[in-house]
Amino acid sequence: MEGYAKVARLMTNHTETACLRGFKALSCQNLLYLQAELIQLEADHETLATTDRSSGHPKRTLYEKSYRLLSQSHKDDHDEQFRNWLQIRAKLKEYYTSLEHHIFVSHLSKPSSTVLEFINDWFARKTMGGCPLLDIDRHAWDKKNETDIITLRDPSNMDIFSHWFCEKLIPMLHSHCFRRFKKPIQWDPESGLSDYSDSAVATVLDLLGTVISSLFPVSSIAVLYSVTGMSYRIGIVAGFTALFSLTLALITKGRRVEIFAATTA
C-alpha cells in the first residue's frame, strides 16, 4: 500500500491523525467575491427597477407590485429586471451555502502540536510513511500551515488531564516500557507503530478519576485530624477546596458554574 491510500489508512485507523487544511483564508476570499457580486447585482436591480418604474409602459410600471407580470416580462421583451432577479436568487443561494460551510469549518477544532509533529515525522521516516505524496500537497501539514489545519476527530469530550495522558504519558510509557510487549500495527508492521484501544484508555482514565475523587475526602479528614489549631484547619480546608476545584477543572469537562456548585456543596 502506497501513496494516498497509505495516508488514508493511517487517518482511518488512527483518527487523531485525521487532519486536513481548512483553507479558511480562501473561504473568506470566496465570500468576499460573492458579496461583491451580490452588491453589484443589487445595484443593477435598483437601476432596472427604476427604469421600469419610470418607463411609462402599462405593464413595466407594475413589475414592482406584481410578480406575475414580472415573471412574464419576457413576453414584452423587457425581462431584464426578472433575469437580474434570477441571478440574485442563484447567487444568494451560493453565498448562504458558502457562508454556512465557512462557519462550520471555523468551529472545527485544531489538532495538537504533538499530533502534527507525529504526522510530519511519519511522512518523513522511510519505515513509516516514506514520503507517500510527491506533489506540492505533501506540505499541507507543514508548520507554516499550523493555524489552518483542522482535525476531523472531535476532541471536545477530552479534558486537560485526558489530553496530557494520551499525548504525553502514553507515548513516554510506550517508549520506556510497553514497546517490548506491544506488537506493531498489522497493516504496517515495518513502521513500528503500536495501537492503544480508545475504550481501554477511557477505562483507565475513568478508574484514575474514581481513585482521585475517592482520595479527597479521606485525605482531607486525615490531615484535619492531625492538626489541632483552628486557624491551621481553616487554612487546610481552603487549600483542599482549591485543590478540589482545580482537579475538577483538569479531569472533567464541567462548566464553571458546575465546578462552583460542586465546590460549595
Image (tube, helix red, strand yellow):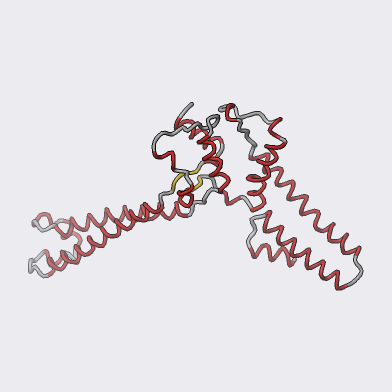
- Residue 215: x and y in percent read 81, 54
- Residue 87: x and y in percent read 23, 55
Residue at image point 7% right, 69% down:
56
7 is higher (above) or lower (below) than 43? above
Q: Image check: 141 left or right of 204?
A: left
Residue at image point 20% right, 61% down:
67
Q: How many marks?
A: 0
Q: Quadrant of residue 201?
A: top right
Residue at image point 85% right, 69% down:
233
Report the residue that reaches farthest toward the bottom: 231
Residue at image point 51% right, 35% down:
124
- Residue 262: x and y in percent read 72, 63
Q: Quadrant of residue 88?
A: bottom left
Q: Image check: 255 left or right of 71?
A: right
- Residue 103: x and y in percent read 43, 55
Using the image as rendered, state which of residue 213 and residue 29 is in the foreground: 29
Quarter occupied by the C terminus: bottom right
Q: Image check: 40 left or right of 143?
A: left
Q: Image check: 112 left or right of 171?
A: left
